[in-house]
């Protein structure tokens, strides 16, 4: 087992040693602090109508998201009641987790090298899902592509949102940053 003091994620080292220099040259930054970097990755599973019928579904989503992230996920609750959807205030509807630091780099590594290649009929992720401020959002239809999830133990297959938040000022800078981490863009 690796000592917590000596372990540095592979992508963090890659960013420090190679990617930061490439971005500095590509966009003409004056110093290292101007170069964009990853700030956080937010993972979200929304249970929707299943959680309205059975409150244990949100707990199941929380457990699966905790396994994927390696950090305890929070249960998200409804902010207000919506009679048409049979939703009451404070009803559990899903789970979310925010990853920063080493866990963020480890998750991105597993996403790019293990999970995305396991997606059925995968042709790359859309390069157009930036928000105009340098943040990237993508969705997965099945959370079971992660190796931490035992397919036989899963009672429900969830969709999952992944938001990569960067310090980049523009979408072009963020696309270049995330692309240097070997994100498989579709053509």
Image: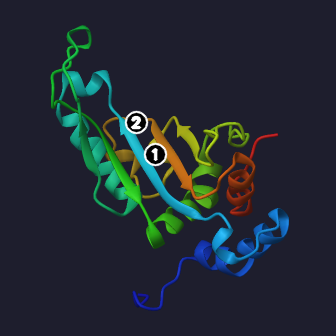
Q: Point out which mark residue 101 bears.
A: none
Q: Is residue 174 left or right of residue 45?
A: right
Outermost residue to the front: 30
Residue at coordinates 61% horizontally, 45% vertically from top-left?
Answer: 133
Q: Is residue 109 left or right of residue 147?
A: right
Q: Is residue 21 left or right of residue 51?
A: right
Circle 1 crowding by C-alpha within 10 Å: few under 14, some 14–19, many from 20: many
Residue at coordinates 63% horizontally, 60% vertically from top-left?
Answer: 113
Q: Point out which mark residue 144 bears.
A: 1
Q: Is residue 176 left or right of residue 39?
A: right
Outermost residue to the top: 84
Circle 2 crowding by C-alpha within 10 Å: few under 14, some 14–19, many from 20: some
Q: Quadrant of the C terminus?
A: top right
Residues 172 and 139: in front is 172
Q: Quadrant of residue 24?
A: bottom right
Q: Point out which mark residue 157 bears.
A: 2
Percent coordinates x, y for residue 55 in the rendering: 17, 31
Q: Is residue 21 above or below residue 1?
A: above
Residue at coordinates 41% horizontally, 87% vertically from top-left?
Answer: 1
Q: Is residue 61 above or below residue 23?
A: above
For mark 1, give the secondary structure. helix
Percent coordinates x, y for residue 22 in the rendering: 80, 71
Residue at coordinates 36% horizontally, 63% vertically from top-left?
Answer: 70
Q: CA distance from mark 2 to mark 1?
A: 7 Å
Percent coordinates x, y for residue 126 in the rendering: 70, 38
Percent coordinates x, y for residue 17 in the rendering: 70, 81
Residues 62 and 175: in front is 175
For mark 2, give the secondary structure. loop
Question: Looking at the image, do the residues carrying marks 2 and 1 touch, with CB atoms under 8 Å apart?
Answer: yes
């Amino acid at each position: 087992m690796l000592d917590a003091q000596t372990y540095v994620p592979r992508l963090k080292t890659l960013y420090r040693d190679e990617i930061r220099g490439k971005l500095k040259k590509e966009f003409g930054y004056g110093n290292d602090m101007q170069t964009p970097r990853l700030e956080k990755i937010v993972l979200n599973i929304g249970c929707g109508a299943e959680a309205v019928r059975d409150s244990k579904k949100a707990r199941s989503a929380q457990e699966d998201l905790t396994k994927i992230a390696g950090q305890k996920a929070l249960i998200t609750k409804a902010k207000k009641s919506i009679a048409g959807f049979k939703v009451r205030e404070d009803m559990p509807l899903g789970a979310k987790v925010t990853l920063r630091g080493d866990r963020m780099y480890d998750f991105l590594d597993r996403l790019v090298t293990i999970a995305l290649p396991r997606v059925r009929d995968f042709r790359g992720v859309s390069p157009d899902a930036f928000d105009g401020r340098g943040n990237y959002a993508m969705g997965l239809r099945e959370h079971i592509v992660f190796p931490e999830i035992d397919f036989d133990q899963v009672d429900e297959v969830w969709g999952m949102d992944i938001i990569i938040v960067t310090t980049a000022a523009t979408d072009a800078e963020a696309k270049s940053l995330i692309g240097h981490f070997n994100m498989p863009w579709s053509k």
